[in-house]
Image (tube, grey):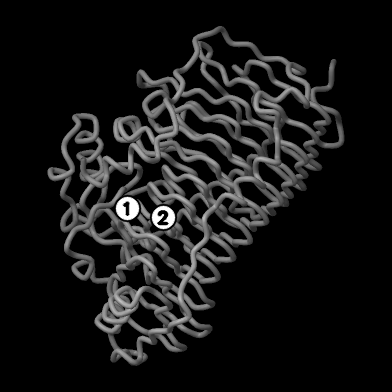
């Protein structure tokens, strides 16, 4: 049995329940606030925090300038030497002092804390050839061999990226972002032959056909952008304090990891697919005191796409999001859309969201191609200034109702949410044949809204203490 197969077995917590067939039913009332399927028990959120295994490093520093690094000169070799020395010594901190250090990809090893001091910046090269050879990665929920992420670890334990410095991906409208190709939100340059669409379609077809990883070779000519920081199949991961900016693709992407803490980071990137933090098929995750200002979802919880997500069958679970600030983005706290492996036990609290460019505050997105069982999801104490949509649960995302894997969303509670201004409050729609189940919205106050929106195909819908534009909702008329 290889390591990846062992990972699948170790992380698999049980079979994912199948979708239940039933007729659609929409009503106010349903379950009382105290009748949650899982009890709405926020004590579990604290137990998740308490159960996350923490990183720990010996008090040894390996300063990259002692390995030949100089500000303004390529520091790749010095970083690699310092990481190797730290790892071989049993662990410690690899320290990046103040100054701008250009570099290529950084590969972390077990027991290494990459620590960027205040005023330090790792400035990543924009030459894609620097990110070869190909590494085992996951891209939009699909397994492949692709360009190395800028900071990458695979199969490592006890690793960290910390400090007050900056990880700068240097992506912009003329570098990395044009690989997205034409798009309705395009603000980047279009460059001849740079378009991810053909490779994305080919990879999607390979996933459907069950092609082995060895045949999923991308990189040069594919235009599939790498994430900035990806940890794949790692244990005890800490990302703390740093600013991450201008990423080619997703910013922080733990995949198949356990015991992940993301604390006090700032994510700032306004390119295509600039998701802030996307834990995927991960168990025991804490994201707290972070600030997100992004070109896509601020936080998006995922678990693999289509056949890959179903074959791994590793849900994202036991996740706490707390005390974060969301500014621009497609969504604040999001689940999906690559969610075929399912998600359960997610708790989000005390977050602040506001921007004219924030499209949705709380969002769940899937479809009958991607499917997934999404359950025991709780939000509370959310303060929203300006947003387009407040609550979105969408079974018709992207491909729409075009597959054979009906999603199941059940036991979702939204409690104590205040909104200053929204264009629309609800965009909630299950399938008529397969409704959303057990949705409770309790104490939602929207001061100004252009439209109440849509609530349809929901079984056991509880609306308690909901007001829109100063009036109780529903009105009861």
Left or right, 165 with respect to 388, comes to left
Residue under pointer 2: 235
Q: Identify the residue at image location x=65%, y=22%.
A: 438
Q: Residue furthest left?
A: 215
- Residue 277 location, x and y as percent? 49, 54
Assign the C terminus to one quadrant of the image. Answer: top right
Mark identifier at residue 180: 1
In the figure, residue 340 lies in which quadrant? top left
Label 1: how many residues lie within 10 Å, few (<14), some (14-19) or many (20+)?
Answer: many
- Circle 2 SS class: strand
User: Is the Cβ of the residue at disc 2 closer than 8 Å to that at disc 1?
Assistant: no
Mark identifier at residue 412: none
Q: Identify the residue at image location x=21%, y=33%.
A: 205
358 or 281, nearer to the observer: 281
**Earlier sequence position, callout 2 versus callout 1:** 1
Vertical position of residue 415 compared to residue 238: above or below: above
Left or right, 49 with respect to 442, comes to left
Left or right, 462 with respect to 291, comes to right
For the question of whether residue 160 can be seen, the reply is: yes
Label 2: how many residues lie within 10 Å, few (<14), some (14-19) or many (20+)?
Answer: many
In the figure, residue 417 lies in which quadrant? top right
36 or 89, nearer to the observer: 89
449 or 161, nearer to the observer: 161
Q: Gap in Å between the C-alphas at discs 2 and 1?
A: 32 Å
Q: Identify the residue at image location x=41%, y=55%.
A: 235
- Circle 1 SS class: helix
- Residue 212 location, x and y as percent? 16, 38
- Residue 272 location, x and y as percent? 41, 54
For the question of whether residue 174 can be seen, the reply is: no
Q: Residue furthest top?
A: 23
């Amino acid at each position: 049995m290889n390591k990846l197969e062992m990972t699948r077995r170790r992380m698999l917590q049980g079979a994912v329940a199948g979708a239940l067939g039933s007729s659609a039913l929409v009503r106010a009332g349903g379950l009382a606030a105290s009748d949650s399927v899982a009890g709405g028990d926020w004590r579990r959120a604290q137990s998740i925090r308490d159960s996350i295994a923490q990183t720990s490093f010996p008090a040894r520093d390996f300063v990259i300038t002692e390995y030949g690094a100089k500000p303004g000169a390529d520091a790749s070799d010095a970083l690699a030497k310092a990481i190797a020395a730290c790892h071989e010594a049993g662990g410690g901190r690899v320290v990046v002092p103040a100054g701008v250090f250009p570099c290529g990809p950084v590969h972390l090893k077990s027991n290494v804390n990459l620590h960027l001091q205040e005023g330090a910046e790792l400035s990543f090269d924009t030459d894609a050839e620097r990110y070869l050879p190909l590494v085992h990665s996951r891209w939009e929920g699909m397994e492949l061999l692709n360009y190395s992420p800028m900071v990458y670890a695979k199969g490592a334990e006890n690793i960290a990226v910390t400090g007050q410095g900056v990880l700068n991906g240097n992506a912009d409208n003329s570098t990395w972002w044009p690989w997205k190709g034409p798009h309705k939100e395009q603000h980047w340059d279009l460059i001849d032959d740079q378009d991810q669409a053909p490779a994305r379609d080919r990879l999607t077809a390979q996933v459907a056909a069950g092609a082995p990883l060895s045949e999923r070779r991308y990189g040069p000519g594919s235009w599939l952008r790498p994430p900035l920081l990806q940890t794949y199949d790692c244990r005890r991961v800490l990302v703390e304090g740093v600013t991450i900016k201008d990423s080619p693709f997703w910013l922080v992407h733990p995949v198949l990891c356990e015991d992940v803490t993301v604390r006090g980071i700032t994510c700032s990137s306004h390119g295509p697919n600039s998701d802030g933090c996307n834990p995927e098929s991960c168990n025991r995750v804490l994201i707290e005191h972070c600030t997100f200002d992004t070109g896509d979802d601020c936080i998006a919880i995922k678990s693999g796409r289509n056949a890959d997500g179903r074959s791994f069958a590793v849900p994202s679970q036991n996740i706490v999001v707390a005390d974060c600030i969301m500014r621009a983005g497609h969504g604040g706290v999001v689940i999906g859309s690559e969610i075929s492996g399912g998600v359960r036990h997610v708790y989000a609290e005390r977050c602040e969201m506001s921007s004219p460019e924030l499209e949705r505050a709380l969002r769940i997105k899937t479809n009958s191609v991607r499917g997934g069982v999404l359950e025991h999801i709780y939000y509370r104490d959310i303060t929203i200034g300006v947003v387009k949509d407040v609550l979105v649960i969408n079974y018709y995302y992207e491909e729409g109702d075009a597959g054979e894997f009906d999603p199941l969303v059940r036991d979702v509670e939204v409690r104590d949410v205040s909104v200053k201004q929204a264009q629309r409050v609800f965009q909630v729609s299950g399938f008529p044949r397969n409704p959303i189940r057990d949705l409770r919205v309790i104490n939602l106050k929207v001061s100004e809204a252009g439209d109440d929106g849509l609530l349809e195909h929901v079984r056991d819908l509880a609306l308690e203490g909901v007001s829109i534009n100063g009036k109780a909702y529903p009105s009861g008329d």
